[in-house]
Image: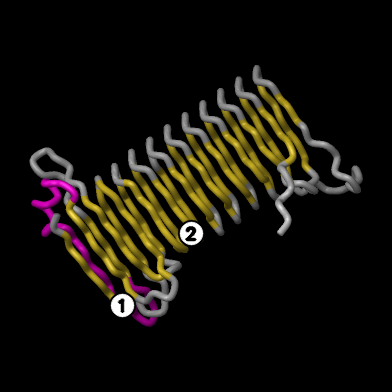
């Protein structure tokens, strides 16, 4: 299949990337020590092959006061058909990216900066980023590490997040949510999807569900303030008083969980393995 390529020097500052596509795949690969944006757009079907020359690829070079900026936009219709493209961008680490991908899958590799992603049915896989803002319809999202804040919303897709360092906001209708480690404030809203947090840290967790279950594991050694309520679901707290924690010790974590018919469960997380 035919393809298009493009390359530009980025300078010392992390670049900014804007990708708009409809079907196929988008891969952003952050390379340590890199100083170029290297682009390849490949046609994946006959409709894309006919439109490959109409793919828009452009860039503003780096200036003393602004980073290099790259944009990619693909045509989305040919005689009633949606063409499918594979877009690959190699970039220096820390790049900021904005991706609009209707039915395309997105994968990022390496350490990215701020990510803004919107999509419909495509799946999302993010290795590591500084900040994440994600809005998808039915696609699933698998997120590794977000060192800063994260905001994610989906209708029916499942969300899986490894760790978030500085606050998390999640909204889902029927998709399930799984979170590994959290620090900072967490807000989760779900209709019928289940929510699980494996290691909650300092700050607060506010969770609201209709029929979905919520399970939160609290890191060992933390004193917790609990506010749990459910109309018809079961409530189960397995927290025990930590040794040496007096009654006047302020809470390090507050849990406010609400459900209509979903079950609520709070327990201690397993101790972290020693080196």
Indicate whether 18 appears above or below 162. below
Q: Which mark is residue 161?
A: none
Q: Residue at image x 39%, y 50%?
A: 117
Q: Position of residue 52 (x, y in %)?
A: 13, 56
Q: Is residue 120 left or right of residue 165?
A: left
Query: Residue beneath label 1, please?
Result: 9
Q: Is residue 236 left or right of residue 122?
A: right
Q: Is residue 27 magenta?
A: no
Element class at badge 1: strand
Q: How many numbered tags mark residues here?
A: 2
> Between 214 and 66, which is closer to the camera in this rendering?
214
- Residue 221 shows up from this direction: yes
Choose top left, top right, bottom left or bottom right for residue 187: top right
Quadrant of the rendering where the N terminus is positioned: bottom left
Q: Position of residue 20 (x, y in %)?
A: 27, 53
Q: Tell me the distance, in whole angstroms, between the alpha carbons under discs 2 and 1.
A: 22 Å
Q: Is residue 151 left or right of residue 262?
A: left
Q: Is residue 48 magenta?
A: yes
Marked residue nearer the N-terminal end (2 or 1): 1
- Residue 202 shows up from this direction: no
Part of the protein shown in magenta: 44-68
Query: Residue beneath label 2, please?
Result: 129
Q: Is residue 127 left or right of residue 84?
A: right
Element class at badge 2: strand
Tags 2 and 1 in contact by the CB under 8 Å rule? Answer: no
Q: Position of residue 201 (x, y in %)?
A: 69, 49
Q: Residue at image x 26%, y 47%?
A: 24
Indicate whether 165 appears above or below 46. below
Choose top left, top right, bottom left or bottom right for residue 166: bottom right
User: Pointer 2: residues within 10 angstroms few (<14), some, or many (20+)?
Assistant: many
Q: Residue at image x 41%, y 54%?
A: 116
Indicate whether 50 appears above or below 121. below
């Amino acid at each position: 299949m035919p393809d298009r390529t493009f390359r530009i020097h980025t300078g010392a500052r992390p670049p900014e990337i804007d990708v708009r596509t409809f079907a196929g795949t988008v891969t952003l690969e952050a390379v340590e020590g890199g100083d170029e944006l290297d682009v390849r757009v490949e046609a994946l079907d006959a409709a894309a092959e006919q439109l490959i020359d109409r793919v828009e690829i452009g860039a503003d070079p780096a200036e003393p006061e602004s980073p290099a900026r790259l944009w990619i936009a693909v045509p989305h219709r040919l005689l009633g058909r949606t063409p499918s493209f594979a877009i690959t961008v190699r970039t220096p680490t820390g790049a900021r990216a904005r991706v609009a991908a209707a039915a395309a899958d997105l994968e990022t590799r390496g350490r990215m900066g701020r990510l803004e992603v919107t999509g419909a049915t495509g799946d999302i896989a993010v290795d590591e980023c500084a900040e994440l803002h994600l809005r998808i319809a039915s696609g699933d999202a698998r997120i590794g590490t977000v060192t800063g804040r994260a905001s994610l919303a989906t209708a029916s897709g499942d969300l899986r997040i490894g760790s978030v360092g500085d606050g998390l906001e999640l909204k889902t209708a029927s998709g399930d949510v799984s979170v590994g480690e959290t620090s900072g404030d967490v807000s989760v809203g779900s209709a019928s999807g289940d929510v699980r947090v494996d290691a909650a840290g300092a700050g607060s967790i506010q969770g609201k569900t209709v029929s979905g279950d919520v399970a939160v594991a609290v890191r060992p050694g933390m004193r917790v303030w609990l506010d749990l309520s459910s109309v018809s679901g079961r409530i189960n707290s397995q927290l025990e008083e930590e040794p040496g924690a007096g009654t006047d010790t302020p809470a390090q974590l507050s849990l406010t969980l609400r459900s209509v018919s979903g079950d609520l469960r709070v327990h201690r997380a397993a101790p972290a393995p020693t080196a």
